[in-house]
Amino acid sequence: MSPKRAPGESALTIRLTDLRVPISIGWTELERRAPQPIRFDLEIALPAPPAATVSDELADTIDYAALAELIRRTAAEEPVRLLERLAAKVADAVRGALPGGARLRLVVTKQLPELTGGHGSASIELIVGGDLAE
């Protein structure tokens, strides 16, 4: 999942998993009536380890709490109908907070609504940035 790199060059992957945000989403008005817990899982592949691996300073890496808050804020900004739109909005916001050369893999999941008689979940996966020609 890491971007391609030269032999001997190191990289680092940061993951934020199972972040749940209650938002209004769905194609029908009935489905959007009550907020639903939407799950966000993301993986950030950095082309090189951040300076925090040596400095032990938060300012030298990606702040997970700030990233989670950015996702929550972006997801709750306005109601959306489709997971595709939600995933694109969140991916755009997160990409803006990442260093150059980083690759983002974002998975957005929601439970199928009871009103459809469905069980299980639906997910959208976006991969942006880095070297996608692996």
Image: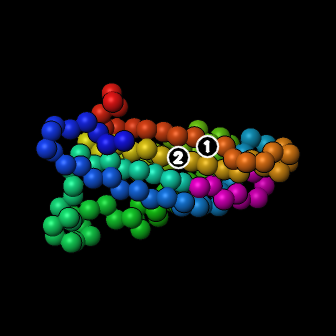
| Residue 70 found in image quarter | bottom left
Residue 48 on the magenta span: no
Does residue 70 appear in this view?
Answer: no
Instruction: Please provide percent x and percent y for residue 108.
Output: 57, 48
> Image check: 8 left or right of 30?
left
* Mark identifier at residue 58: none
> Image check: 27 left or right of 131?
right
Q: Name the residue under label 2.
A: 107
Q: Nearer the viewer, residue 113 or 54?
A: 54
* Mark identifier at residue 123: 1
Instruction: Please provide percent x and percent y for residue 2.
Output: 31, 42
Q: Nearer the viewer, residue 100 or 9?
A: 9
Q: What residue type is labelled 2?
A: Val
Instruction: Please provide percent x and percent y for residue 41.
Output: 50, 53
Q: Which residue is drawn at 17% across and 61% down?
A: 51
Q: What is the magenta range?
A: 30-39
| Residue 117 found in image quarter | top right
Residue 38 on the magenta span: yes
Does residue 6 appear in this view?
Answer: yes
Dot 1: element = strand
Q: Is residue 80 above or below residue 65?
A: above
